[in-house]
Amino acid sequence: AQSVTQLGSHVSVSEGALVLLRCNYSSSVPPYLFWYVQYPNQGLQLLLKYTTGATLVKGINGFEAEFKKSETSFHLTKPSAHMSDAAEYFCAVSGDTGFQKLVFGTGTRLLVSP
Amino acid sequence: NAGVTQTPKFQVLKTGQSMTLQCAQDMNHNSMYWYRQDPGMGLRLIYYSASEGTTDKGEVPNGYNVSRLNKREFSLRLESAAPSQTSVYFCASRVTGGGTGELFFGEGSRLTVL
């Protein structure tokens, strides 16, 4: 069965610093991978996704992620953090029954200090 | 451009009371989902409906029932609420058949069971 591990329930960075949120997955089939962002008291919004093709995926708000099959990773990065990036981020992998179920990680809360 | 709409947004129940969470989507999606979100546990799938007329259990179905009323609407019912069901509930939908698995989420329903 598919699974996702997000390392670090909280990550703190200073404004302008590099953001790195880690995600490792387990999948018995070629995965589709997603990053979602959740701002306080809101639902989840898609940040970016990897399906097939180019392994470096660019998303909204300057975020990007790289699919590394050999490392079973899909880490999320942003070169320079903004205060508005403070939110909770979830990595997800498509289920082994195709797309019927997405399996989510436990989330990483990003804190950005001035 | 409503997307996925959930009602109510907030609800307080006493143990043993029943209630129904409503969800409607206007994107003509075939599949609909109910997740619960708890601190440190990410999103866990309660039930899903791959298409109108079908429903299936997810990871944590105990204590819940669902109804896929039509293509647009998917409701979640708690027959006898328990404090362990205090959570934030999210409805989501997605395209099936040729899609990439991306889920579209509602803004959530915050339920407290006393």
Image: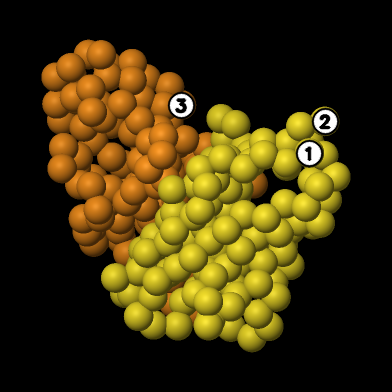
Type of the residue with mark 2:
Pro
Chain letter for the part of the structure drawn in orange: B
Q: Which residue is mark 1?
A: A14
Q: Which chain is yellow?
A: A
**Can you tell which of label 1 and label 3 is closer to the viewer?**
1
Check disc 1 and give the amino acid type: Ser
Rounded to the nearest angstrom, the CA distance separating label 2 from label 3 is: 32 Å
Tell me residue A101's x, y (percent): 36, 63
Mark 3, residue position: B9
Which of the two marks, 2 or 3, is nearer to us in this view? 2
Q: Is B24 placed above or below A102 here?
A: above
Are labels 2 and 3 on one chain?
no
List the residue tagged with mark 2: A114
Say whether residue B51 is left or right of residue A63. left
Q: Amino acid at mark 3?
A: Lys
**Of A62 and A44, which appears nearest the observer?**
A62
Which residue occupies 32% across, 64% down? B50
Classify A76 as above or below A17. below
Label 3: how many residues lie within 10 Å, few (<14), some (14-19) or many (20+)?
some
Q: Position of residue B41 (x, y in %)?
A: 37, 43
Callout 1: residue from which chain? A
Structural crowding at the residue carrying mark 1, measured as other residues with C-alpha within 10 Å and reported as few (<14), some (14–19) or many (≥20): some
Residue nearest the viewer, comparing B23 with A89? A89
Q: Residue at x 51, y 43 (%)?
A: A9
